[in-house]
Amino acid sequence: TLNGEILVVSNSDLANSKVHNYKKMERRRVVLSIGVTYQTTQEHVEAIPGIIRDIVESTTVIAGVVCDRSHFKGFGNFSLDFETVYYVPVPDYPVYMDVQQSINQRIYAEFNRLGIEFAYPTQTLFVERNSEAETT
């Protein structure tokens, strides 16, 4: 296993299972999902896919990182959701993690610089006052 343990599998289990051969992997596909608050300006909502695409395509951790797509995906329960897909040109897990970390740090820094807020689970409670109870 990835943890260094020896895994014993019976022939019948192996014959009835899907086997993932990571040694044959040529590149890694990464799906990056980001949510921003509903208070995000229209200009920022329109700019975010391009901002993320530029960050992915300009990564310097390893040459050949390719941004497949970056889109405003939809309206979540508490966030405006964006999805980006990119490819890391090597299968090595540590390289993939280095690329992902670099991209995430740069997105975080750029969003902070622009004043774009990341969303987190929130709930707004509206309280209506009963006007009859106040009259005497």
Image: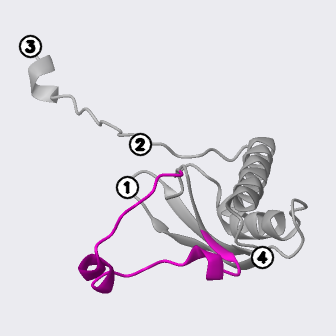
Of the two numbered discs 1 and 2 on the same chain, state the one appearing first in sequence: 1
Q: How packed is label 3: few (under 14 Cα within 10 Å), some, or many (20 or more)?
A: few
Magenta extent: 4-30
- Tell me: 105 left or right of 132: right
The residue located at (62%, 74%) in the rendering is 71
The residue located at (49%, 59%) in the rendering is 1
- Which is closer to the viewer, label 2 or label 4? 4
Of the two numbered discs 2 and 4 on the same chain, state the one appearing first in sequence: 4
In percent of width and height, residue 68 lies at 70, 81
Q: Nearer the viewer, residue 92 or 45?
A: 92
The image quadrant that residue 103 belongs to is bottom right
Decide: marks 3, 2 in contact (CB < 8 A)?
Answer: no
Dot 4 lies on which element? loop
Of the two numbered discs 1 and 4 on the same chain, state the one appearing first in sequence: 1
Q: Quadrant of the C terminus?
A: top left
Of the two numbered discs 1 and 3 on the same chain, state the one appearing first in sequence: 1
